[in-house]
Image (cartoon, rainbow, N blue to C red):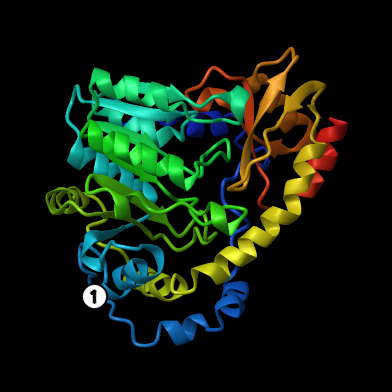
Amino acid sequence: MNNHFPKLAMAKFSEQFKGQKLQSMHNTNPKPFGQYELEQTIGMSFSEILQDVNLGFAPDAGTVGLRNTLAHHHYEIIESDEIITHAGAQEALFCVFSALLKPKDRVLIVAPVFEPLVQIPLNMKCHVSYLQLDNENNWSLNFDEVEAEFIKGCQLFVINFPHNPTGATLSRQELLKLVNLCKKYDVWLLSDEVFRGLEHSLNLRLPAVADYYDKGISVGVISKAFAIPGIRIGWLACQNEQLRKKIIDVKGYLSICNSQLDEKLAAVLLQKPEKLLERNLEIIVKNKPLLKEIKELCKSSINIAIPHAGCCVFAEIKNGNLSAGELAKQLALKTGYLLYPSSLFKTKTQALRIGFGTAEFSRFVKLSSLA
């Protein structure tokens, strides 16, 4: 038995519904693009983009074209040689944790939390502490608690804003306050920024942590905010050269390098981020008012804090007789939709993650009101 890589709880939970042909309604990315729609959006065909692509191995850190695109269009200060591309964001996270941490290091993580953000350091025998967002105050972050945890000693603080699963985010001032606390206590700051760009108003767009802190690490991906999961490109940005070298060493045990085809496509697509985000935000803004119509799920009262970013919410169960896991099972049986319960997110709050970034969301709202 492989004790180093236990099956993720999300995979375990989904396995029990195998063969039932449920439709996911817990997704955190908007409806994925199809090839034709994507070509129309950017005004170029895949065949034009992929003319005479080099089919040899890509550089370990990523092609110059893709890293130049990311540096120019997605960061303010970060330069292309301070970016490493990966086969998705999860590989980037694995490499960062493996390069940065050792057993017994203390890691502080904002919760509720996307499982791999916590499970990887747990697998490494790190001491993990959770800083729970305040569900009574729109899932806000308590900065006094952050500093109290830093005073105890902390090697790494892991954040994810815009946040999965709540849709919460920080203001620019709050993010800079957090960066200053990390500087004060010499704490590495890992920022999972895969939903950056899905702020519902442009003035809420957060800067990248890597631009503002020399011990800050920003992780991005083309699958979430940009809704292109079929192109397996993630990346990280970090000013610290020594850490980047260690990350490349870890990557050598995994993908080593990305597909030249994927990197070329991403290099061109990500030159027009606002065109991609505009399409995705149009879906989100259309569906967002429907969140107010969800009052009950299977006779259990539901409370939803309407988010200002992203396309998922953490719907709290109020005055219900069922746990989040039991309610998710009932919904699957009665509606054919699969939601993820709070037991998968390292929190005691009883809630369900609901995604509202697809055209199917309106149908879900109607069916759930009848269940």
Residue toward you, 115 or 237: 237
- Residue 262 shown left or right of residue 306 in the figure: left
**Which residue is depicted at the point 79% across and 35% down?**
294
What amino acid is labelled 1 in the image?
Gly
Q: Label 1, on which residue?
A: 56
Above or below for 333 versus 211: above
> Regarding mark 1 in the picture, which secondary structure is present there?
loop
Quarter in which the C terminus is drawn? top right
Q: Can residue 172 be seen in this snapshot?
A: yes
- Residue 348 shown left or right of residue 20 in the figure: left
Above or below for 92 versus 262: above
Q: Give how far across and how far down residue 206 sits, in percent.
A: 46, 51
Residue toward you, 303 or 64: 303
Question: Which quadrant of the view contains residue 81?
Answer: bottom left
Question: Which quadrant of the view contains residue 298?
Answer: top right
Q: Give how far across and how far down residue 29 sits, in percent.
A: 57, 51
Label 1 packing within 10 angstroms: few (<14), some (14-19), many (20+) = few
Residue toward you, 232 or 312: 312
Quarter in which the N terminus is drawn? top left
**Which residue is depicted at the point 32% across and 41% down?**
190
Q: Give how far across and how far down residue 11 sits, in percent.
A: 49, 34
**Which residue is depicted at the point 74% across and 51% down?**
287
